[in-house]
Image: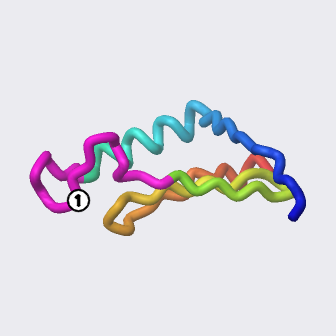
């Protein structure tokens, strides 16, 4: 079996993406400790990064299925 080279990714949001993400997160209801879905480490969010030859697609998903696409297609 071939050996695998470890990979690491750094995702740097633009100011516009940061603003959209914060606004979206502020509109979500985060469960309180003891409620179903509660998390001790902000594990409510999944950041899905898909690199392409044109640019990176970035989608953030909330644990309940809601998501926001932060991809800035206009910059491709």
Q: How many marks?
A: 1
Which residue is painted at 56% across and 37% down in the image? Answer: 16
Residue 75 within the magenta-colored segment of the rendering: no
Q: Which residue is mark 1?
A: 37
Q: Secondary structure at mark 1?
A: loop
Q: Residues within 10 Å of mark 1 (few under 14, many from 20)?
A: few
Q: Is residue 42 left or right of residue 5?
A: left
The quadrant where residue 57 appears: bottom right
Q: Is residue 28 left or right of residue 31?
A: right
* 14 over 45 or under it: above or below: above
Q: Is residue 48 left or right of residue 63?
A: right
| Secondary structure character of the magenta stretch overall | loop
The part of the chain drawn in magenta is: 29-46
Which of 66/44 is in front?
A: 44
Which residue is painted at 47% across and 54% down in the image? Answer: 46
Residue 5: x %, y % from top left: 83, 46
Residue 50: x %, y % from top left: 70, 58
Which of 24/51 is in front?
A: 51
Residue 36: x %, y % from top left: 16, 61
Quadrant of the image for the N terminus? bottom right
Which residue of the protein is positioned furthest toward the front in this rendering? 1
Residue 35 within the magenta-colored segment of the rendering: yes
Which of 26/4 is in front?
A: 4
Residue 45: x %, y % from top left: 41, 52
Which residue is painted at 73% across and 52% down in the image? Answer: 56
* 20 over 68 or under it: above or below: above
Q: Is residue 60 left or right of residue 30?
A: right
Which residue of the protein is positioned furthest toward the top in this rendering? 15
């Amino acid at each position: 079996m071939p050996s695998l080279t470890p990979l690491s990714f750094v995702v740097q949001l633009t100011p516009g993406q940061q603003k959209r993400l914060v606004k979206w997160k502020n509109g979500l209801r985060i469960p309180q400790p003891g409620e179903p879905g509660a998390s001790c480490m902000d594990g409510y969010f999944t950041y899905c990064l898909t690199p392409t030859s044109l640019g990176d697609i970035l989608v953030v998903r909330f644990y309940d299925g809601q998501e926001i696409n932060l991809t800035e297609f206009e910059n491709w």
